[in-house]
Amino acid sequence: MRVLVGMSGGVDSSVSAALLLQEGYDVEGAFMKNWEDDDGTPLCTAKEDFMDAAKVADQLNIKLHHVNFSKEYKSKVFDKFLIDLEKGKTPNPDVLCNQFIKFNEFYKYAIENNFDCIATGHYAGIKEISGLNYLVKAKDKNKDQTYFLCNINQKVLDKTIFPLSELTKKEVRDIAKSMNLSTFEKKDSTGICFIGERPFPSFLENYINDKPGKIICDKGNEVGLHRGLSFYTLGQRQGLGIGGLKDYDERPWYVVEKKLSENILVVAQGNDNQQLFNNKLSVDSINWICEPDLTEPIKLEAKIRYRQDDQECILSKKGKTFSVEFKKPQRAITPGQSIVFYQDNICLGGGEIYKS
């Protein structure tokens, strides 16, 4: 069976390719370039990542394809990212990248080049139940990435392999070291793929103009000025520029609302401020990898951000939209972010939060 492995230049995808070779698959690798604006700074690691992927491919004696999806990434991921920010949302480009690039464009490239399936270094698993493939959590719950895979579909899942599903991160690094792979000590990448580790506001100002406005507290008093609502997200504490105000105590300030029509940022004091919490949200559409019976409200688990523990909730379908009610109030429910649904160990799918 011919397998095309997405090789990012990191240890996870390196070990994925090596394990598939050991299992007897006919393996080739592919390095995806999804971002053109390489400014040459140490914060943009695309060139280094490609060289690392090439070193591993050479060590494993496999062919490495160099594919460029930058045009597709810009039109399907980055442009939507900017539009959503200007609408006051906080989008998740990593979810969109998996949906439109890694498990769409990359998948199509593999099929068009006569590969039987694709593989990636994601920490996730696939389990067949009654003839259907289900997306399941990885053994390493701390690294599980099913949250970011909520928008893939059954067709692609049928042609996908996740070699790391039963491994912990430590085991992956140990395997890489035992095989003397050049990436065995490489630091994990962090941050949004096209931003890297650079500060988010300084990156964003290259694409979105400042639109200053008032910062008001929950009591209605003006307490500062913001640079533009796109630069802030619900629950944010850092970068507000508020402090030492007369008639206010020293508790930190948090963003609790963005009034888009008035260009006003609303803040409140205290990490446990009740305005930061809500037990309900709405979703306009859900991508179901495997759809449950929704004729009646259904009890599920869900998470509204990566690494959050699964939260008990009731999901109800109302026409074309969905409402979610959590057993416990959730902090900083953020429009634009993804809510992902689980049943036991199975990731059922997810959708974009549009209202809390």
Image (tube, grey):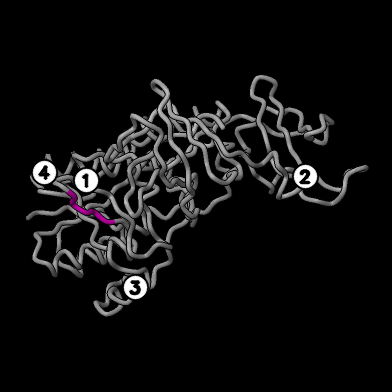
Asked which secondary structure carries label 2, the reply is: strand
Residue 126 covered by magenta stretch: yes
What is the C-alpha distance between the residues marked 4 and 1? 18 Å
Give me the residue at 48% from left, 35% from top: 324
- Image marks 4 and 1: residues in contact by CB distance under 8 Å: no
Label 2 Cα neighbours within 10 Å, binned few <14 / some 14-19 / many ≥20: many
What is the C-alpha distance between the residues marked 4 and 2? 56 Å
Residue 41 visible in the picture: no
Residue 201 screen position, x and y as percent: 60, 42
Label 3 Cα neighbours within 10 Å, binned few <14 / some 14-19 / many ≥20: some
Residue receiving disc 2: 269
- Amino acid at pointer 1: Leu
Residue 233 screen position, x and y as percent: 61, 39
Residue receiving disc 4: 113
Residue receiving disc 3: 173
The first of marks 4 and 2 along the sequence is 4
Residue receiving disc 1: 157
| Magenta region, residue range | 125-129
Residue 38 screen position, x and y as percent: 43, 46
- Amino acid at pointer 4: Asn
The first of marks 1 and 2 along the sequence is 1
What is the C-alpha distance between the residues marked 1 and 3? 26 Å
The first of marks 4 and 1 along the sequence is 4
